[in-house]
Amino acid sequence: MVISYSIKFLKNSFFFKFRFEKFYWFISSDNYIVLGGRDQQQNDLLVKRHLRSGDLYVHADLHGATSVIIKNPTGNGVPPRTLQEAGILACCHSAAWEAKVPAPAYWVKHDQVSKTAPTGEYITTGAFMIRGLKYVC
């Protein structure tokens, strides 16, 4: 009885994986879950499957940077500290970090991110169209 309980406890506590653990992720200082893609396919997956209404999309202002999502289930405003932490994640996982070049990060609302391109253009895997205003983190 004790052995089966301890094995069940170990299985539940140490080997349990959340569905978002395949991405870069952390819990912000204000208790928001922040997710980032590791490559182009994960960036697509994040935006297509995990970006919901109320969430925010954060990206470094460079080509090839990771897409970062701040999960906001309540839909209320996200504190500036969380926006800054997500912007740091986006900049740290970009080409600017290795080149030691400062790069700004911006955030937009979920409905400003689109995979549809203007007529005659093509959007590659991991790339998105941002419509509207971009807010600097």
Image: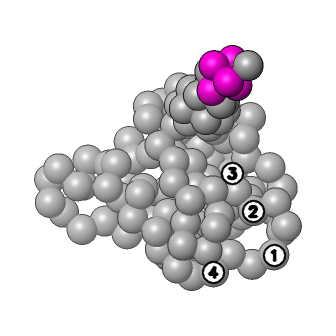
Give the magenta-colored segment's residue range: 2-6
**How far across and down, in percent of the image, does residue 21 sit?**
56, 36
- Under tag 2, what secondary structure? loop
**Which label is found at residue 79?**
4
**How far across and down, in percent of the image, does residue 78 sit?**
68, 75
Measure how far apart labels 1 and 3 are at the Cα level.
Answer: 19 Å
* Mark 2 crowd level (few <14, some 14–19, many ≥20, 10 Å Cα): some
* Mark 3 crowd level (few <14, some 14–19, many ≥20, 10 Å Cα): some
Amino acid found under the numbered disc labelled 4: Pro
Q: Is residue 8 above or below residue 97?
A: above
Instruction: Determine the residue positioned at 44% across, 35% down.
Output: 38
Q: Is residue 87 above or below residue 19?
A: below
Q: Which residue is mark 2?
A: 72
Position of 90 with respect to 27 (left or right) is left
Q: Which residue is mark 1?
A: 76
* Mark 1 crowd level (few <14, some 14–19, many ≥20, 10 Å Cα): few
Instruction: Determine the residue positioned at 57% across, 48% down.
Output: 35
Instruction: Determine the residue positioned at 51% across, 54% down.
Output: 26
Q: Is residue 118 magenta?
A: no
**How far across and down, in percent of the image, does residue 54 sit?**
80, 62
**Which label is found at residue 113?**
3
Measure how far apart labels 2 and 4 are at the Cα level.
Answer: 11 Å
* Mark 4 crowd level (few <14, some 14–19, many ≥20, 10 Å Cα): few
